[in-house]
Image (tube, rainbow, N blue to C red):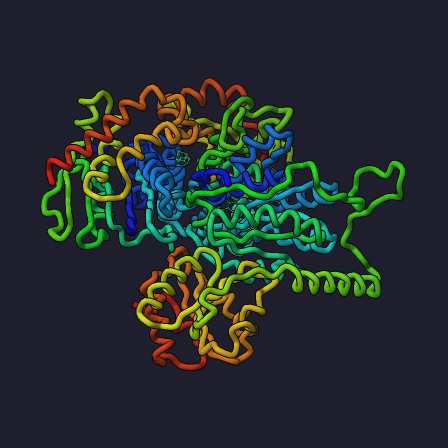
Amino acid sequence: MNHQIIMAGFGGQGVMLIGTLLTYAGMREGKHVSWLPSYGPEMRGGTANCAVCISDAPIASPVVTEPTAVIAMNLPSYEKFSKILVAGGSLIINSSLVSVENIRGDIKAYRIPANDEAETLGSQRVANMVCLGGLLGVEDIVEIETVIAVLPEVIQERYHHLLDLNARALRRGYEMVREMK
Amino acid sequence: MKPVYLRPKSLTHTVTHYCPGCTHGISHRLVAEVIDELGIQGKTIGVASVGCSVFAYNYFDTDFQQAAHGRAPAVATGIKRVHPDKIVFTYQGDGDLASIGAAEIVHAAARRENITVIFINNAIYGMTGGQMAPTTLEGQVTTTSPFGREHGVQGYPLRMSELLAAVDGAYYIARCSLHNPVQVARAKKSIKQAFQNQMEGRGFSMVELLSTCPTNWRMTPQKALEWVEKHMIPVYPLGEFKRGEGE
Amino acid sequence: MSQPILMKGNEAIAEAAIRAGCRFFFGYPITPQNEIPEYMSKKLPEVGGVFVQAESEVASINMVYGAAGAGARVMTSSSSPGISLMMEGLSYIAGAELPCVIVNISRGGPGLGGIQPSQADYFQATKGGGHGDYKVIVYGPCSVQEACDLMVKAFDVADKYRNPVMILGDGMIGQMMEPVVFRGGQGEGSLPEKPWATTGNEGRKSNLITSIHLDPEVLDAHNWKLCQKYKAIEENEVMYEVYREDDAEWFLVAYGTVARICISVMDKMRKEGFKVGLIRPITLWPFPKAAFEQVADRAKGFLCVEMSTGQMVEDVKLAVEGRAPVYFYGRTGGAVPLPRAIEKRMRDVIEGREPVVTDYLEGRGGGVK
Ligand SMILES: Cc1ncc(C[n+]2csc(CCOP(=O)(O)OP(=O)(O)O)c2C)c(N)n1
Ligand code: SF4
């Protein structure tokens, strides 16, 4: 098992947070993990991304150039990263913000209206969690229960009243993808 | 139809990398308008510093050199001494000019270098992600003054215009603000003056522009403009601090 | 053992320094190491320490000089362009024999270069950088965990030899999050005595911290004394790892984050039947010549992989002393060597599709598709 995942979106969509969350869960399950953010003025254009590696073996490089899975929360991210996804890889597209045709045929693509679903659940802010839940539904990376269990350790204390909402958003994304599969 | 606004000739058609609501864009436009109005595009050489404006050369359609952090006035000195008949300006942030480059700016003024300096004071380090600048206000929270700047620990904000006005070689020193249209118009007048001085060979001119960094101040662009007026101007009063007599 | 925690390299390095008893930090912002000063500005006051944001790196390193001379455990951190500005001060620190730790989370150069990971500061770190005959002990960690362990060690080694120590990381080490366990570190309690420090001469003769010796005889003697110290460091402080020493015939040579990539290449090639091993220098100065001695009678060739156009490879050649061919593969400017490019290069080497005389340029990233 060697997952190399890129999560990307606008600054503020919380892609760094879901990356951290997944990495934390991987560590909790005893796997080798790394998390590498985009940094510097690269961020100024408004997009952010992070690369997460989760593996049974020590991580060779935290830099991901050929991801096995991608979460694209906005259009620029879709355009940038869907291209470099390996054949057979998984792509989670936030279809609330990204409407694209002609997705590559050699990958597993799932469109989730993450913002709309999050809104229904209570707040658009958890659209990132819906996407992460979706990823967990397609790829055997870590157990969704582990992710939910580490939520309190990753999310800042002042947002702890939202833990339940985050957990529900994770489950919602997970179920949606399971239904599509 | 008569156009009411055109892109200055001295600006390229490149979309800037600045954050939404950042006043770097306004300063660029003012400088470019002045260059156009004075008809000096073909003989102007800019010096870009290290800060968010490091890529200024992508936006100005004039010759440019990119300098090391803080050293733009020294680089400008080199250019001007080779081409005394050309118009040389530096464009520097407050970290660049008031911190690491404090020596270079003082000595460029002391040497009476006939250059124009555009000094962007946004009270923070923008490029590197919001650390304290020498110009950071007392009480202001930054990533390296997490408990707010306190004079007992980090000292006081540095007023560069006042400081440089005390240097004999400085000919023209003014501080303007970009927080509303009236002030923007005044800033343009000062910038024009600073370039004209150079054309007339009068020596060192600097215009300090109170600017915003909504991203690292963690404010909306609108709030950031209000913050300039409410919090920066009391510490950094506007006006001309020096205007030399003709020589 | 305590549970690992997930931490960004820069923050973990700062935390390790505090645990090692470092109470003074002087620095200036620069990407990609900003989290170190930011962490220090928050945490040092909590433990009674002092954080000062200097007006420049020139000032930072001289503040370090002053604090080290005054007897403190002190550090600074920066990235390549800032480290260049520190070279003058570093030479003075080495000359005055002051212990301190400098962290370089290096990025692509020359000049303003870029902000992505690079190993192009190897020469500057290991061959002097400033003027005069001096040496800086340089560690090249390959993971966040190792960076923390070496950080603790660095302060002890600096005190032991009264010598500056550098941690040479890169943007990857600084920015990535990995699990880390903090171990070692002595807090403030048991730091060594520094009777030479300027603490006020009450009850003793005056102390002087200086690097000026105008009399040639005196300066000559001082330099040979330093040289002896460096010899002792070479004898005692070398650190490295050799992988698959048992049967390897072809060796990859790499340090820092690049070594990790090479380990994955080694593992893959071994599965395909190639007898590949790896030498990973941990101290870059003193350079681990012993590692090459160890494998000298069996090694058929070495492939040095770096994020530079070829710097450490020169030390590899000196260590190998012509006993086997030395090849090179590098990427620069933030481009990271890809496992399959390294593998292809290694196959070329093993299968003899490579001139014996190494041409650095031929090894450049662009040369291998
Ligand atoms: C020698 C050196 N030290 C540090 C840096 C990192 N650095 C880049 S920009 C900058 C400060 C920018 O702040 P400022 O001048 O206020 O301009 P702004 O980004 O706010 O426009 C720093 C410290 C560098 N490039 N070179
Ligand atoms: S970081 Fe601040 S100064 Fe830099 S472009 Fe953004 S708003 Fe402007």
Q: Is residue B238 left or right of residue A46?
A: right
Drawn side of residue A147 relative to residue C147, left or right: left
What residue appears at the point 83 percent right and 45 percent down from the top-left corner? Answer: C207
Q: Is residue B194 visible?
A: no
Residue B143 position within the rendered picture, expressed as x and y whole percent measured from the top left: 49, 32
Measured along the vertical axis of the image, is residue A81 above or below residue B235? below
Residue B204: quadrant of the picture: top right
Q: Position of residue A3 (x, y in %)?
A: 28, 49
- Residue at figure coordinates x 47%, y 31% from the top left: B122
User: Which of the 4 image quarters holds residue C187?
Assistant: top right
Asked if residue C353 lies left or right of residue C151, the reply is left
Give the position of the C terminus of chain C as an image quadrant.
Answer: bottom left
Using the image as rendered, state which of residue C263 and residue B240 is in the foreground. Answer: C263
Of the pair A110 and B85, the residue shown nearer to us: A110
> Total number of numbered labels?
0
Q: Quadrant of ligand 2?
A: top left
User: Residue A181, relative to residue A128: is it above or below?
Assistant: below
Q: Nearer the viewer, residue B177 or C175?
A: C175
Residue B235 visible in rendering: yes
Query: Does residue C204 sit above or below C279 in this rendering?
Result: above
- State the image quarter where residue B112 is shown: top right
**Residue C333, x across and y down, in percent:** 41, 57
Q: Residue at x 39, y 53 (%)?
A: A58
Q: Nearer the viewer, residue B196 or C169?
A: C169
Q: Position of residue C154 (x, y in %)?
A: 61, 50
